[in-house]
Image (cartoon, grey):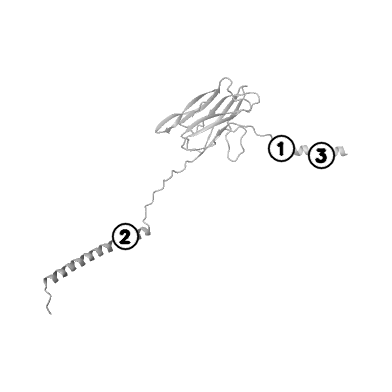
C-alpha cells in the first residue's frame, strides 16, 4: 500500500510538471536571431545600422547573409561598410513613384544586400558578426521590416522572415525591425514676438528729459540775469548822482 501511494504521488508530480510546462510555457531559452542595431531611427534622416548575426549551429559556420529591404519603404541611398573576409553585392528594383534624394528623382532602389564569406571568414559556432549599412533618407513610415536568410556551411538556412503582429507574441523566426520616429520640429520655428519697452525704461527716459529741460531753463534764466544786470550798470553810468 505504501509503495502504491509513493508511485501514485510521483506520477501526480510528473503530470503536474507536464501540465505546468504546457500551460505556462516553461521551456528552454529562446534561440538567438538576427537583429538590427540600433532598433530606432528618425524619418527623413540618415542612419547607420548594423545587422547582428549570431551563429546558432554547433558544428557549421555562417557563410552567407541575404537582407531583403521592404518594398513598401524604398530608400534612395544605401551603402555598405567593408567587412573583412566578406564580399558584398546589391540588387535593385524599379520604384514608382520615384524617390527624391537631394533634388534628384530616382527610379531605382536597392532591394537586396548579400554578404558572402570567402575562405575561412565565416561566423563560427559561438560567435557573431555585424554587417553595417548606411540608409537614407528614411521613409515616412512607422517601421521597416527586413527579411533575412542566414546560410550555413552545411547547407542549412535559417529564414528570419516572420513579421511581427500587433499585440501578439514574438514569432518563431522574427524578421529584424527598425522603428522610425517622426522628426522633431526645428528649434525656433515659432514666430518671434515684438519687443515691448518696460515701464522702468519709460521712467528713465522721462527722468532724463526732465533733467535736460530744467538745465536749459536754468541756463536761459542765468543769461537773462546777466543781460538785465548789464543794462542797469550802463544806466547808472549815464545818469549823474544828485547832489545833496
Image location of residue 155, percent across then percent down: 61, 22
User: Eyeballing the image, is 180 above or below 209?
Assistant: above
Tell me what residue is drawn at x 73 percent, y 38 percent: 19
Depth check, mark 2 against mark 1: the one in front is 2
Tell me what residue is drawn at x 72 percent, y 39 percent: 20
Residues under numbered marks 3 and 1 in contact, where contact means CB atoms less than 8 Å apart: no
For residue 9, the mark is 3
C-alpha span from label 2 to label 3: 103 Å
Q: Nearer the viewer, residue 140 or 226?
A: 226
Q: Nearer the viewer, residue 97 or 2?
A: 2
Q: Quadrant of the N terminus?
A: top right
Among numbered discs 2 and 1, the one appearing first in the sequence: 1
Residues under numbered marks 2 and 3 in contact, where contact means CB atoms less than 8 Å apart: no
Q: Could you classify mark 2 by the number of other residues whose Cα lies within 10 Å: few (under 14), some (14-19), or many (20 or more)?
A: few
Image location of residue 22, percent across then percent down: 71, 37
Image location of residue 97, percent across then percent down: 43, 33
Query: Which residue is disc 1 drawn over?
Result: 21
Tell me what residue is drawn at x 31 percent, y 60 percent: 208
Q: Nearer the viewer, residue 39 or 200?
A: 200
C-alpha span from label 3 to label 1: 18 Å
Report helix, strand or loop for mark 3.
helix
C-alpha span from label 2 to label 1: 90 Å
Q: Total marks drawn?
A: 3
Among numbered discs 3 and 1, the one appearing first in the sequence: 3
In the image, farthest residue toward the top: 119
Image location of residue 124, percent across then percent down: 61, 25
Classify residue 222 by image quadrant: bottom left
For residue 208, the mark is 2
Amino acid at each position: 500500500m505504501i509503495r502504491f501511494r509513493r508511485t501514485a504521488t510521483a506520477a501526480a508530480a510528473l503530470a503536474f510538471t507536464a501540465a505546468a510546462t504546457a500551460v505556462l510555457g516553461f521551456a528552454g531559452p529562446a534561440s538567438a536571431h538576427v537583429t538590427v542595431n540600433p532598433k530606432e531611427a528618425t524619418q527623413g534622416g540618415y542612419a547607420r545600422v548594423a545587422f547582428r548575426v549570431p551563429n546558432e549551429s554547433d558544428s557549421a559556420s555562417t557563410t552567407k547573409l541575404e537582407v531583403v529591404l521592404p518594398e513598401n519603404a524604398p530608400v534612395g541611398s544605401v551603402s555598405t561598410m567593408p567587412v573583412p573576409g566578406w564580399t558584398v553585392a546589391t540588387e535593385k528594383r524599379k520604384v514608382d513613384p520615384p524617390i527624391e534624394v537631394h533634388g534628384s528623382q530616382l527610379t531605382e532602389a536597392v532591394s537586396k544586400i548579400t554578404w558572402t564569406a570567402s575562405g575561412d571568414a565565416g561566423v563560427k559556432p559561438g560567435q557573431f558578426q555585424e554587417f553595417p549599412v548606411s540608409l537614407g533618407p528614411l521613409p515616412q513610415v512607422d517601421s521597416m521590416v527586413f527579411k533575412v536568410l542566414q546560410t550555413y556551411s552545411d547547407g542549412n538556412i535559417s529564414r528570419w522572415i516572420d513579421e511581427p503582429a500587433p499585440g501578439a507574441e514574438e514569432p518563431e523566426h522574427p524578421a529584424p525591425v527598425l522603428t522610425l520616429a517622426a522628426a522633431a520640429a526645428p528649434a525656433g520655428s515659432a514666430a518671434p514676438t515684438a519687443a515691448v519697452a518696460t515701464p522702468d525704461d519709460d521712467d528713465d527716459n522721462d527722468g532724463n528729459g526732465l533733467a535736460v529741460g530744467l538745465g536749459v531753463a536754468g541756463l536761459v534764466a542765468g543769461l537773462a540775469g546777466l543781460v538785465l544786470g548789464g543794462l542797469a550798470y550802463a544806466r547808472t553810468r549815464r545818469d549823474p548822482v544828485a547832489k545833496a
